[in-house]
Amino acid sequence: QIVIMHDDDVDRMTDGKGKIAEMTLREIKALKIIDRRSNLPPESVKTETVPTFEEMLDAAKREKLNFYLDCKEIDPRQVMDLLVKYKMERNCVAYDGLDGCRAWKKVAPEIPVMTSFPRTIKTPDALEEFWRRDSVEILDGSALGYTAEMVTAAHQWGAVVWPDIQNPGENPSQWEPSIRMGVKGLQSDHPGALVNYMKSIGKR
């Protein structure tokens, strides 16, 4: 079974402990979601269980949602079977390491894939050399790892740049440099605030 959890263990986001790969679905379903970063008392937030990927798709099938599949130790064929079952194979992009992206290209070449580049890459030429080995559709990576020249060059090759900006202190002063560089998207922990800011400056 595929379950929805960012980490490879349940320690941070549930009231339990353990590696997901070493647990049964019944054991995972017995846990309750709890955000340990929240200031709320544990008893007030333990209301949800860990969803499976199929449960998420079933809940979302009536909504106009797109998915960013941050893949962790899963077989793309298993994911694809469920996407097809729920007719959502056109509503997602898949993030993975390079080996995983290659697997996605074989199993589902119509699904855009995204990967990060090494932090040692600092120039457009080095980024192009990395990209041309696998030619993913979307480039990830820290927003601080890009220059305007790198973003412009990537878009000229046909890649889209969606860098990470996530941090607790996100604000317009952090978003603005990436927006000026011309990125096509930002991965944010504060999407509502980012959308409102984009509207305020006429970018959305």
Image (tube, grey):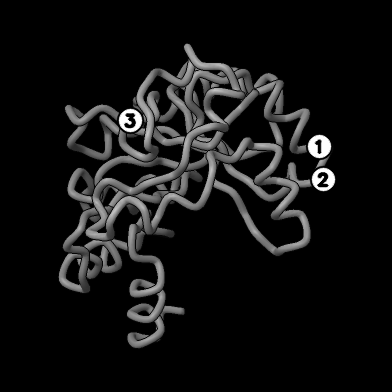
- Residue that mark 1 sits on: 84
Q: SS of the residue at dot 1?
A: helix
Residue placed at 41% from the left, 75% from the top?
195
Mark before the other along the chain sequence, 3 or 2: 3
- Residue that mark 2 sits on: 87
Give the amino acid at mark 3.
Answer: Asp
Task: Give coordinates of residue 10: x percent, y percent.
Answer: 39, 29
Left or right side of 134 for 128: left
Left or right side of 89 for 33: left
Which of the 4 image quadrants contains residue 107? top right
Give the amino acid at mark 2.
Answer: Lys
Mark 1 is surrounded, within 10 Å at the Cα level, by few (under 14), some (14 to 19) or many (20 or more) other residues, namely few
Mark 3 is surrounded, within 10 Å at the Cα level, by few (under 14), some (14 to 19) or many (20 or more) other residues, namely some
CA gap, disc 3 and disc 1: 32 Å
User: Which of these two is toward me, 148 or 191?
Assistant: 191
Question: Are dots 1 and 2 in contact, CB under 8 Å?
Answer: yes
Give the amino acid at mark 1.
Answer: Val
Task: Give coordinates of residue 201: x percent, y percent.
Answer: 33, 85
Which of the 4 image quadrants contains residue 98? top left
CA gap, disc 1 and disc 2: 5 Å
User: Which of these two is toward me, 119 or 4?
Assistant: 4
Left or right side of 46 for 30: right
Marks 3, 2: nearer the viewer: 3
- Residue that mark 3 sits on: 11
Marks 3, 1: nearer the viewer: 3
Question: Are dots 3 and 1 in contact, CB under 8 Å?
Answer: no
Q: SS of the residue at dot 2?
A: loop
